[in-house]
Image (cartoon, rainbow, N blue to C red):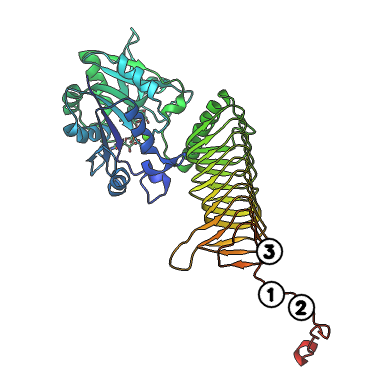
Amino acid sequence: MGLSVVILAAGKGTRMQSSMPKVLHPIAGKPMLQHVIDAANQLNAEQVVVVAGHGIDQVKAELSAQKVVIAEQAEQLGTGHAVDQALPFVKSENLVLVLYGDVPLIKTETLKSLVEQTPKNGLGLLTVKLDNPQGYGRIVRNNNDQVVAIVEQKDANQDQLLIDEVNTGILVAKGTDLNRWLKNVDNNNAQNEYYLTDTIAMAADEAGVIASHPSSAIEVEGVNSRVQLAQLERAYQLSQADALMQKGVTLIDPSRIDIRGELECQSDVLIDVNVIIEGNVSIKTGAQIDANVILKDCVIGEATHIKANCMIDGATIGKDCQVGPFARIRPNTELKDEAFIGNFVETKKTVLGKGSKASHLAYIGDATVGEKVNIGAGVITCNYDGVNKFQTVIEDGAFIGSDSQLVAPVTIGKMATVGAGSTITKDVPSDNLAISRTRQKHLEDWQRPIKIERKEDKK
Ligand code: UD1
Ligand code: CA
């Protein structure tokens, strides 16, 4: 049987105090709603229908590139009403799995086992036992321990309030069955809402309800405030940190790493505190990442050392390299093996050849640098004339003296030397020394300026 996933995401999220719909607030850099959609996609759902209401335009814009149907629920009349808005878009012979845009940490395995356990023509319900069930719908079971109904907190009697098994809200049933049951749901209750949970008693009467459980309560926790958002963020980050350590990565403090994307690490990688990972990052064996480094869409080679406070974005860094501290490596940088980038060096669209060095305070952009080149402190490739960008080529073994400007397009030949403080505008042939500064003069009768006394100064 095919699977359709319906994600409820129409609520306002008043307590977020935000102009952005709650479900678009991020966990690990990704909207909560997207986490839920990703879980649905991992189940190979045939259809994903998002029920949106508050901030629907923002939700639509966020999901515009995805194969997701958006059903509008203009007025939030309850969870049953919300599912009802989605059903016209759902293949009725499919199984329908109901998820929530503000319950972002739900695991695919939990959902798989829920779907598998769902009885034919019955309903599968995800429930959890909580020390404090306050606020949740309670799971009512009969003497045979079978689920017979859900009663909401506001409608529960004293005995029912003692029940510690609660409804997560997540459930599965056939589209045709849900549709039929929802037709019989009314809003005669404490909140005057159409409760999705009222379908449970109907399913129990017809064919039975099977309750299954998540591996931990955090999976089914919802977000209503920024405090809860931060709690789930840390829980998610800790679980990613655990997974890394299981694979042989040393984290100096697992509570101080943030992975907002995909991080793939080989063994014996060491990551110090406050490292942020974005996009797709791959770190090879034995590499070391020091404190306060931001790595985005990059590859860090074997045994390479990224020192503190570097930003690396869109780069491929080879093995045995050293980068930083305080280096900025921008998109389309390639550092070949054993390259050395020191503090306050910025690179962009640049290949730095094997064993080449830029140790301090340099800007190297739109450049191709050969092997064993030495780029002195304060060297700048002047790649931009205000309108166009041009290339700088520095061939193997060249030495660029400190504080030189290489005005592109320009080529520095093999083993050439540029004297410190030169402005190079013409190609330098191999093995030559190029120097473009005025000769040093000495003025013997030079006098230092003398302080001019002014009346005001005396006051
Ligand atoms: C619901 C369940 C309760 C369960 C709890 C788990 C019902 C009646 N109750 O209660 O048994 O223990 O979730 O958190 O289902 N939503 C819409 N449209 C609506 C109403 C809600 O999209 O008209 C969305 C909300 O944005 C929210 C979710 O559905 O994400 C849950 O709605 P909410 O009103 O918070 O339900 P609870 O009272 O928490
Ligand atoms: Ca809720």
Q: Where residue 255 sits in the image (x, y, percent)?
A: 59, 34
Real-space Cα separation, disc 2 to disc 1, in angstroms = 9 Å
Report the side of 310 relative to 168 (left or right).
Answer: right
| Label 2: element kind | loop
Indicate the amino acid at tag 2: Lys
As measured in the structure, the alpha-carbon distance from the residue carrying label 1 to the one carrying label 3 is 12 Å
- Quadrant containing the N terminus is top left
Residue named by callout 2: 441
Q: Nearer the viewer, residue 183 or 389?
A: 389
Q: Are marks 2 and 1 in contact (CB under 8 Å)?
A: yes
Q: Position of residue 340 (x, y in %)?
A: 64, 46
Using the rendered view, name the quadrant where residue 53 is placed: top left
Residue 419's disc number: 3
Rendered-image quarter of ligand 1: top left
> Gap between marks 2 and 3, in whole Å?
17 Å
The residue to which callout 1 is attached is 438
Query: Looking at mark 1, is its residue's CB closer than 8 Å to ligand 1?
Result: no
